[in-house]
Image (tube, rainbow, N blue to C red):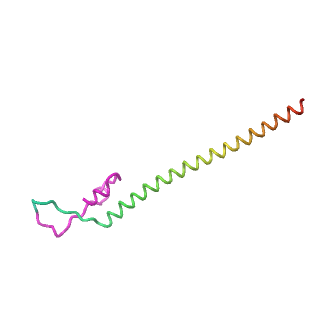
Amino acid sequence: MCVNSLSQGLNVDLPKAGLEPQTSRSDSRASTTRPRRHTCNIVVVAAVVVAIVVKVAVVVAVVVKVAVVVAIVLKVAVVVAVVLKVAVVVVVVVEVVVV
């Protein structure tokens, strides 16, 4: 129960990862009135937390890459603006010299 609630939305396949919920050993007799309880294993909780942290880190890395691309585009825009200013100065100088 605890493992399933923690791993929802994480796309974590618990049986494949070897992280199946641990059943309590004290409830070894078969009971038809209540289901077996599952204990929260600290290793499973830690694995789920690490999975969440890794996903957040991936999102942060993508945001940083987008920010780098935006910075490059802005630098190119500044260079284009400087070239246009130089072009305006050249046009003004040519007009003054010609006239």
Q: Is residue 49 above or below residue 77?
A: below
Residue 68 location (% of width, % of height): 58, 50
Residue 18 location (% of width, % of height): 30, 60
Q: Residue furthest left?
A: 32
Camera-side residue of 96 and 63: 96
Q: Quadrant of residue 25?
A: bottom left
Q: Quadrant of residue 56?
A: bottom left
User: On the picture, is 98 further left or further right than 72?
Assistant: right
Q: State the predominant SS element of the stretch in magenta.
A: loop
Q: Range of the magenta residues?
A: 1-30
Q: Quadrant of the image for the N terminus? A: bottom left
Query: In the image, what residue occupies the spot 49% across and 54% down?
Result: 60
Q: Is residue 39 above or below residue 69?
A: below
Q: Quadrant of residue 15?
A: bottom left
Q: Residue furthest bottom?
A: 26
Q: Is residue 28 magenta?
A: yes
Query: In the image, what residue occupies the spot 32% across and 56% down?
Result: 7
Residue 93 location (% of width, % of height): 85, 36
Query: In the image, what residue occupies the spot 61% across and 48% down?
Result: 71
Residue 95 location (% of width, % of height): 85, 31
Q: Is residue 51 magenta?
A: no
Q: Quadrant of the image for the C terminus? A: top right
User: On the picture, is 47 further left or further right than 86?
Assistant: left
Query: In the image, what residue occupies the spot 83% across and 35% down?
Result: 92
